[in-house]
Amino acid sequence: MTHEKPHRWRFFRAGGFDQVQLQSPEDLAALRGLDQKLWATLACPTKNLELDPRMLAYIDGNNDGRIRAPAVLDAVDWTLARLADPGLLFSDAPLTLAAFKDDALGQRLTVTAQRLLSVLGRDDSHSLDAADTDDLNKLFPPNEANGDGLVPEALTDDASLKAAIADIIACLGAETDRSGAPAVSDASISAFFAQAQQVYAWEQRAIEASLQPFGEITDAAIAAISALREKVEDYFTRVDMAAFDPRAASLMNGQESELVRLSSMSLANAGEIATLPLAGVHHGESLPLGRGINPAWSGAIHALREHVVQPVLGEVEAITKQQWRSLLAKCNDYFAWQAAKPDVVILQKLDVARIVWLVEHGIQDKLLALVAEDKQVAEAADGLVELDKLLRFKRGLVTLLKNFVSFENFYGRREKAVFQAGTLFIDGKSCDLVVEIDSVDAHSKVAANSSSFLLYCTCSRRGQPIKGRESLNIVAAVTAGSEGELLVGRNGLFYDRDGNDWDATVVKVIPNAISIREAFWSPYRRISTLVSEQIQKFAATRDAELVNSTAASVGSTAAAPAAEASAAAKTFDIAKFAGIFAAIGLAVGALGTALATAMAGLLALHWWQLPLVVLGVILAISGPSMLMAWFKLRRRNLGPILDANGWAVNTQAKISIGFGATLTQLAHLPAGSARSLQDPYAQKRRVWPWVLAVMVVAGVAGCAWYFGWVARLAIGPVA
C-alpha cells in the first residue's frame, strides 16, 4: 500500500508570524489541506480593493459583498480544473488554445475561445487575455440573445414591445443585462402584469356595472361634484346649526375679525377667501347657484350647474338639501368604485388606458417569449462567461492569494498590497499604508486598537470625478519621523493607485508613538511648551493687573488727597523690610550652595566620567518616554486597521520599527545636491544672554573655589 507524500510547504517570517509562500501550482493544489489557522486572513470585502471587480464578483457567489476562505478555495480548484498548465497563473503570458485541458471542460472552453477569436478578427494561433473581455458589448451585443434571461429594448424590433420594456423599467426599475444595458426579467415582467391585471379587472367592473350616471358627461359631472362635495355639505351643516340656535347664525357666516382682516388686503387672489363659507346661511335650505356665492368658488358652482344640475333638474337658480342629496345618490356606485381603485406602483407612472391596452394586447406573453428565446442560447453564452472568468482568475487570482492567504505583497514591498489605496504626502512625509474607508467614525472605533498613529482624511476632486466619484475617505498610518504639525485641518495631497491626485484634509487624528527618536525629544518639547505657556500666562496676568490698576488709579483721582494723607501718616517699617532682604539672601545663598555642590561634584570626577554623567541626565529625562514608546511600537499592528474595513485578519500582522520606516518616507535632499546653509531670513541669534549665563556660572564656581567651599565639601564636615 502506497502513502501519498505530504506537500512540503515553505514559510517566511514577517510581521511577527509565519506566512506561507505560494510559488507553484503544487502549492495551489495543496492549499485546501493547509490549516486555516495559518492563513493571514479568513474573509475580506469585495470593495476598496485594488483588484478586478468582475473577478471578485465571480468569487463572491452569493453576492453578499464578502469573500471568505471557502470561496477562495473553490476559485482555486475551479481554475486548476481547466488549465493544462497551471504554471501560467504565475506568469504574465496570455492564454492560448493549448492552455486548456483536454477534457470536456477544456474542449468547451476551446470552442468558446475560437468563437471569441473570430469575433475579435484573429485566428487560432493568437492568444487571449482579460483585456479582450473587458468590453461586454463585444461579447454580448444588446441586440443579440446572450442566455442570461434578461431582455433589453434592443433585443426586439417591435416598437410596442420596446415601449412595454421601457414602461416596466420606469415602474419597477431595471436589471443589468450581460451587455450592460438595462433590461427586464421574467420575474419583473410577471410582477408588472400582476399589478396590471388588478387595474384591468377594476376598470372592467366599471364597464360591466355601467357606472355612467350622467351619460357621456359623467366624467365632467363627477369632477364637478367631487370639487364641491365637502364645501356644499359644510354649507348645509351651517344652515342646520343656525336653525338649531339663532345665536349661531352670525357666527356661521364667519368671524367678524376675519372679515376685518380681509378688508385690508387685496382680494385678487381668491385663495385668501376660499376658507370662508360657500354662501351665507341666510339663504336657508336653498343653496344659490348664482349671486350670493363665495367668489372663490364661483367657477366650481358654474361647472356644477352646467354639468350636473341643469341636465338633471333643469334651469334652477338654487338647489335644496334634498336635491343635493339626490344628486349625490346617483354617484354612490361611482364613488364606491373609485374607492376600490388598486393601490399599485404602476399607476404612479402609467395611466389606466395604457395599462388596459398592455393587458388586452397580450404584451406579457410576447415579452416572456423573448425571455425564453434568450435562454435558449444559455449554454453557448455561459461558455463565454466561463472564459471571461478564467481569463480574470488567470490575471488576478494569485495576487488575491498573496494578500489573503498571506500578506506577501505587503511585507515584500515589491508591489503594493491590494488594500493599499495609494500614497499620502503631508508634512514632509509620504505614507504608503493608506486604506480607503467608508465611515471615519465607524472605522476609527476599531482601528484605534492598532497602536498606530492614524490620520483620517477626506479627499476631493471638485469637478473632476474619478470613476464617478468626487470625494472619498482614507486612513493613513504614520510609521516613521515625528508628529510635527499633523493636526486636524492640515492639508496634503493623495495619489491613488492610478496616479490621480486628490486634495486631502485631515479630519481626525488618533495619536500614538511614531518612533523612538520622536519619543527621545518628546519630554523636552513638553517642558518647552509648559515653560512657554507659563511665561505667557504670567505675562498675560501682569498685563491684566497693570490695566486694572491703571483704571483704578484713573477712577480714584478724586480720592487722591485723602490717600496721600493716609500714606504720609504711615511710617517706614525697617524690621519688615529687613526680614524680606534676609529671605532673599537666604534664597540666593541656597541657590549658590546648590550650584557649588554640583560644580564640586563635577570637578571631583575624572574627565572620562563627565560624559557618563551627561548621558545619565539625558537618560533620566528621555529614558521613560523612550521605553514607553518602545513598548507601544512593539504592539503596533495592521489587523485592526483592516478589521475596521470588513476584513477578518487571522493574526496581529505587526508593523515593526524597521518595517514602519519603509512605509513612511521622510524628506531627503537628492544625492549630489548643492546646498547653501546661509538663510538671509533666518532668525538672528543673540549671543549676549549665553555669554551672561556662562559668566554667572563661572563666577559662582570661582567664588566656591576662592572661599574654600569646594575644599570643605571634599574634606567633609569637621568633627
Image (cartoon, rainbow, N blue to C red):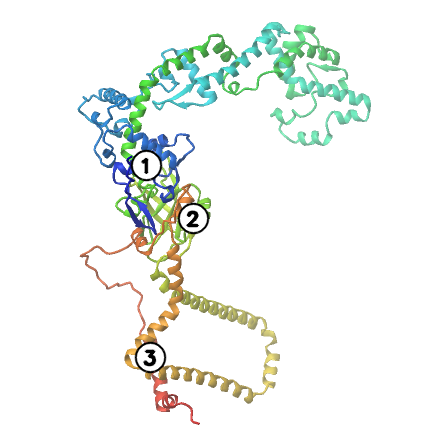
Sequence-first tag of 1 and 3: 1
Name the element at disc 3. Answer: helix
Sequence-first tag of 2 and 1: 1
Marks 1/3: CA–CA distance:
65 Å
| Amino acid, disc 3 | Val
Image coordinates of residue 321 in percent, x first then y, are 74, 14
Q: Which residue is at the far front?
A: 1
Between residues 644 and 208, which one lies in front from this camera angle?
A: 644
Q: How many marks?
A: 3
Q: Using the image, determine if residue 68 lies above or below residue 347.
A: below
Name the residue: 69% across, 25% down.
276
Name the disc covering residue 51, or none. 1
Question: Contact, CB < 8 Å: mark 2 with mark 1?
Answer: no
- Is residue 46 in sight in this rendering? no
Between residues 54 and 481, which one lies in front from this camera angle?
A: 54
Marks 2/1: CA–CA distance:
23 Å
Name the element at disc 1. Answer: loop
| Amino acid, disc 2 | Ala
Classed neighbour count for the residue bearing mark 1: other residues with Cα under 10 Å, few (<14), some (14–19), many (≥20): some
Q: Using the image, determine if residue 305 lies above or below residue 505.
A: above
Residue 526, picture quadrant: bottom left
Name the disc covering residue 694, or none. 3
In the image: residue 467, left or right of residue 321: left
Name the disc covering residue 447, or none. 2
Residue 469, picture quadrant: top left
